[in-house]
């Protein structure tokens, strides 16, 4: 019989492998290698990720390695910047290259500039320019535009970013320092014949999957694909000598036979995560660590990415550092009242000492959970549909649809559509459709419908519940679902006269790409 792991046990296993149950004495390169890198698209927040995992960690232990070129920041998994060892930069980039190429040629902003372009010639020219000296994207694009004046400079620079392994060079990323976002090729940065220099074995997808499980497992095939950005990995996973398990929802899990799987009641101390901590981003089903409270808070998708703290192995609140020359304040915003808040504050004091050792005064400010929500409108939950949702879903759809079509379609047409919708309902199990339902204070309030290839077909909220954040929650959940399917650009169509909806989508970053007599087509780039 296949062993079953509870969600709590899954969380403990991953926390142990992430060094978040207890800090490790391993060196920085050893930890970065074990974790298969740290997402590091921001210059400095990832230092907190190392501090939370390594006993006695100080910033110079990583900063010196960046300067010495033993660590590099390079686009690898999910086409995002990661901090990896020099050896892993050479190992991992070839394996995930299909992800970057897919991003380039399907990109809604730059993809059209690739049509008919001699890409090989652009890459060769870009390598020459980057070998001369590190360059910013703007500088690189401007120089390439001189040779290809019919193409956008930003698109040419983006082509180099996706097709040439680029290192983001110091001082960018060095603790306490700043600098332009400048790049050079990994070959130029690491020296001639870097593969020989580091004795790198032939890159292997099998090895990458095994390393992922050692750092993030147990996991489903979809989890591995979410982390890497690669697709069609089931064949790879199936051929490996792995242990097979199931989670409490019946999903098949794979794991290394000898990997740690501690008991679910093993204590998990308070830990602080940084904004792009991979433990939050590397599973299709993130519930082993991420609670519903995160989604319910409806963080602004275009604002600063929140930083969370864990209590008992789960996201329990967010944190933010405020500093002046005289005072460094760590603001803690728990989602609920915590009996262990003292433990969180003690760990916060240690974090303050790490982040602001040069500031004379340190303060911890804990916000009451009753005041931490940006509105006082109850609790929003986004979930998958149940069959008994049908009547309420159709009712919401009818009310919402009438709100924007009234006065634009004949009443007879609206009435006929309503009769058809109420009589026929919808098939929640139809292939190629993903439904999401929202509850506000445990009452049905809206729904969204997406397709795995990136179409937002519906986002409807009961007009009586407008202004309570239901639409924001559904939109965030829908975009997360598309990211989990590897979508890089989402699309939708909205009724031209539905100005409220068009403002909503524009405020979320959607842009118009086409229109016809009745509808506007919009697109949104997603960071997967």
Image (cartoon, helix red, strand yellow):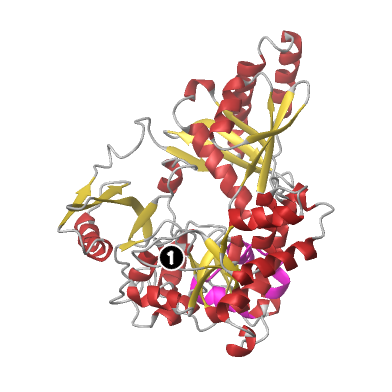
The answer to whether residue 446 of the structure is visible from this angle is yes
Q: Is residue 473 left or right of residue 414?
A: left
Going 42% across and 63% down the picture, which residue do you hit?
Answer: 8
Q: Quadrant of residue 348?
A: bottom left
Local packing at callout 1 (Cα closer than 10 Å; few below 14, some 14-19, many 20+) is many
Front one among 447 and 37? 37
Residue identified by numbered label 1: 173
Task: Tell me if residue 129 comes above or below residue 189 in the rendering.
Answer: above
The x, y position of residue 281, in whole percent, is 51, 59
Going 57% across and 22% down the picture, which residue do you hit?
Answer: 500
Main SS of the magenta segment?
helix
The x, y position of residue 430, in whole percent, is 73, 44
Is 393 contained in the magenta span? no
Name the secondary structure under disc 1: loop
Task: Tell me if residue 365 comes above or below residue 243 in the rendering.
Answer: above
**Which span is picked out in magenta?**
207-236
Going 40% across and 37% down the picture, which residue do you hit?
Answer: 379
Task: Tell me if residue 323 comes above or below residue 378 in the rendering.
Answer: below
Q: Quadrant of residue 132?
A: bottom right
Going 56% across and 76% down the picture, which residue do you hit?
Answer: 189
The x, y position of residue 59, in whole percent, is 33, 71
Task: Tell me if residue 437 comes above or below residue 81 in the rendering.
Answer: above
Q: Is the N terminus in the top left, top right, bottom left or bottom right quadrant?
A: bottom right
Q: Is residue 166 left or right of residue 373?
A: right
Q: How many marks?
A: 1
Q: Quadrant of residue 120?
A: bottom right
């Amino acid at each position: 019989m296949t062993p079953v792991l509870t969600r709590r046990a899954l969380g403990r296993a991953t926390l142990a492998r992430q060094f978040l149950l207890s800090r490790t004495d391993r060196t920085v390169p050893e930890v970065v290698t074990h974790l298969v890198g740290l997402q590091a698209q921001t210059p400095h927040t990832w230092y907190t990720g190392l501090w939370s995992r390594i006993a006695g960690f100080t910033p110079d232990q990583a900063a010196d390695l960046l300067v010495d070129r033993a660590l590099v920041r390079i686009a690898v998994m999910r086409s995002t910047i990661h901090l990896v060892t020099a050896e892993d930069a050479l190992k991992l980039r070839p394996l995930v290259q299909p992800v970057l190429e897919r991003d380039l040629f399907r990109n809604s902003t730059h993809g059209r500039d690739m049509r008919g372009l001699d890409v090989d010639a652009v890459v060769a020219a870009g390598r020459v320019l980057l070998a001369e000296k590190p360059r910013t994207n703007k500088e690189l694009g401007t120089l390439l535009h001189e040779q290809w004046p019919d193409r956008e400079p930003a698109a040419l620079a983006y082509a180099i970013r996706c097709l040439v392994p680029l290192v983001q060079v110091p001082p960018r990323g060095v603790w306490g320092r700043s600098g332009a976002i400048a790049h050079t090729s990994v070959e130029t940065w690491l020296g001639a014949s870097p593969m020989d220099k580091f004795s790198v074995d032939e890159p292997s997808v099998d090895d990458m999957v095994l390393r992922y499980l050692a750092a993030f497992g147990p996991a489903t095939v979809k989890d591995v694909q979410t982390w890497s950005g690669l697709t069609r990995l089931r064949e790879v996973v199936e051929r490996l000598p792995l242990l097979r398990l199931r989670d409490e929802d019946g999903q098949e899990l794979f794991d290394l036979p000898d990997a740690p799987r501690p008991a679910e009641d093993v204590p998990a101390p308070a830990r602080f995560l940084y904004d792009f901590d991979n433990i939050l981003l590397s599973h299709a089903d993130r519930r082993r660590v991420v609670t519903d409270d995160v989604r319910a808070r409806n963080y602004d998708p275009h604002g600063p990415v929140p930083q969370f703290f864990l209590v008992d192995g789960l996201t329990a609140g967010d944190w933010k550092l405020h500093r002046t020359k005289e005072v460094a304040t760590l603001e803690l915003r728990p989602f609920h009242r915590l009996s262990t808040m003292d433990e969180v504050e003690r760990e916060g004091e240690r974090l303050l000492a790490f982040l602001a050792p040069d500031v004379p005064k340190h303060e911890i400010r804990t916000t009451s959970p009753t005041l931490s929500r940006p509105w006082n409108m109850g609790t929003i939950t986004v979930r998958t549909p149940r069959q008994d949702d049908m009547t309420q879903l159709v009712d919401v759809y009818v009310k919402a649809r009438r709100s924007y079509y009234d006065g634009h379609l004949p009443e007879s047409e609206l009435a006929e559509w309503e009769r058809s919708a109420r009589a026929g309902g919808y098939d929640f199990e139809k292939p190629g459709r993903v439904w999401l339902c929202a509850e506000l204070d445990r009452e049905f309030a809206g729904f969204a419908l997406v397709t795995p290839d990136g179409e937002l077909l519906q986002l409807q909220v009961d007009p009586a519940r407008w202004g309570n954040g239901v639409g924001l929650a559904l939109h965030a959940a829908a975009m997360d679902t598309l990211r989990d399917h590897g979508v890089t650009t989402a699309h939708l169509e909205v009724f031209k006269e539905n100005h409220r909806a068009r403002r909503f989508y524009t405020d979320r970053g959607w842009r118009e790409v086409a229109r016809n007599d009745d509808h506007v087509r919009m697109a949104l780039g997603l960071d997967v």
